[in-house]
Amino acid sequence: MQQQNTADLYYKKMTETPVAKLIVRLGIPTTISMLITSIYNMADTYFVGTLGKSAQGSIGILFTLQSIIQAIAFMLGHGSGTYVSKELANKDIKKASEYVSSAFFLGGAIGLVFTALGLLLLTPLLKLLGSTDTILPYARDYGLWVLISCPFMICSLILNNNLRYEGKAFYAMFGLVSGGLLNMGMDFVFIRYCNLGVYGAGMATAISQIISFVILLIMFFKTAQSKIRFRCISAKGKLYLQICRNGLPSLIRQGLNSISSGLLNKLAGNYGARISEEMADAAIDGMTVVNRISNFVMCVGMGISQGLQPVASFNYQAGEHRRVKRGLWVTCMISLICVTVLGLPIIAAPKFFVELFQKEPIVVDFATPAMRYAIFGQLFVPLFIPLNMCFQSIRKAGVASFLALLRSGLLFIPILLATSALWGLTGIQISQPVSDCLTAVVSLPILIKFYLSPDKPVAVTNDEKQIEN
């Protein structure tokens, strides 16, 4: 009876609370958690940067590896979370538990495979991701710990996203923020006082990931409507296909980002090496600093967009399509305002922000114009990231996957190859912002069509019918 009352109250909250208020309420904790994660990534960059540009360059190389791991986690977390929200709208707790349990244990198994294969092939993997010979020793020290923490990282993000899709954004935030703050503190101690260098930064990351996982697991057991149980693991292959298909946009979005980052590092190193070996490391280091700061700005837009996800998923299943459209509009506007407020000071004084992380003149000279270009491109992100996440949340995986392909794949990779061939390091600096601008242009007609489309009853797919039966 209590479970039914909880489901009824949650249904009323998701379908009757003013959309803007609901999105902000769910989006602010997510934004805070993403900002803290970004801040501790920047803390890694700052503390490791005190060890030299080759050491700092290793952070950029491992950021690519972490993005690959996170891509798997987001695919399973968003893919299962969307269906958990759908089943909560149907008030079917048992089915919701089946989705989250299946995703959680599958993610843990994949994480263990990643750890084993990654440790076995660590050196060739890091070289594939763009590591130079001078960066490689540092990348190995950091990468060892990233791979050890891989299963915990994947399961943490699955728990985090399913808590968000259940409207428990505050508890999801608490788990990630605790780990992020702990990571920053351990970075300071391990690098400054224990003299453990890059190895210490990696160890701090691993410890914080494990503690964050434990906190999120406790939060999930205490607050979530759905349950994680061995007996809830599904034996139906179609359920896993559903999760992966609906999570595919997240895999594409994050996975292509890691591939494009690796390619960017490789090209930056190659074109820098044509000038000097020192310039090769400086180019990779410079792009590492630029990516950290631009990702911090983008976190605001992404955080608010993730506040839209449970609102869109639940209300779409409940037949409240106007609330979904209203929610998308609100999210785009809030994201645009936030990104603009954060981005304009960086555009105005990019050198100041670069020098917060690296003061070597060769790195500063390369990263300063790249920073201005990158942040200008970020101003276009609120026009397509919320749209992408909205389509994924209402289970329009095909359109969402196409939108995810644009920024870091269909547009970015050809643009990167073309601009770098034409203008060398300058072409590398402008490739991402050009891709951001074009992605917004391509997304705009899709956004308009979505708003003009008539409201229709939610269709149940054949796969969903077979799983229910």
Image (cartoon, grey):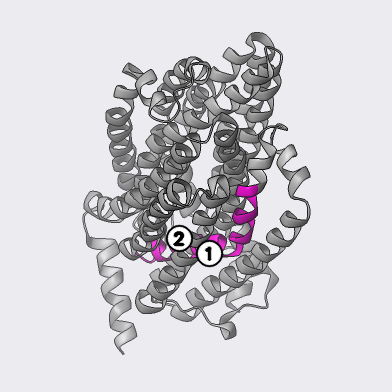
Residue 293 coordinates in the image, percent (x, y)? 42, 33
Tag nearer the camera, 1 or 2: 2
Q: Which residue is mark 2?
A: 161
Evaluate whether residue 90 shows in this view.
Answer: no
Q: Earlier in the sequence, mark 1 or mark 2?
A: 1
Viewer-side residue, 372 vs 256: 372
Where's the C terminus, which quadrant? bottom right
**From which residue to which does the magenta span run?**
141-167
Look at label 2 and name its amino acid: Asn
> Residue, x 68% and y 15% (percent of image)?
276
Viewer-side residue, 272 vs 387: 272
Mark 2 nearby-residue class (10 Å; few <14, some 14–19, many ≥20): many
Mark 1 nearby-residue class (10 Å; few <14, some 14–19, many ≥20): many
Q: Which residue is mark 1?
A: 80
> Residue, x 47% and y 43% (percent of image)?
44
Is 412 situated left or right of 195 in this image? right
Most frequent secondary structure within the magenta stretch: helix
Residue 154 coordinates in the image, percent (x, y)? 56, 61
Evaluate whether residue 446 shows in this view.
Answer: yes
Viewer-side residue, 449 vs 136: 136
Residue 371 coordinates in the image, percent (x, y)? 44, 22
Cα separation, mark 1 vs mark 2, equals: 9 Å
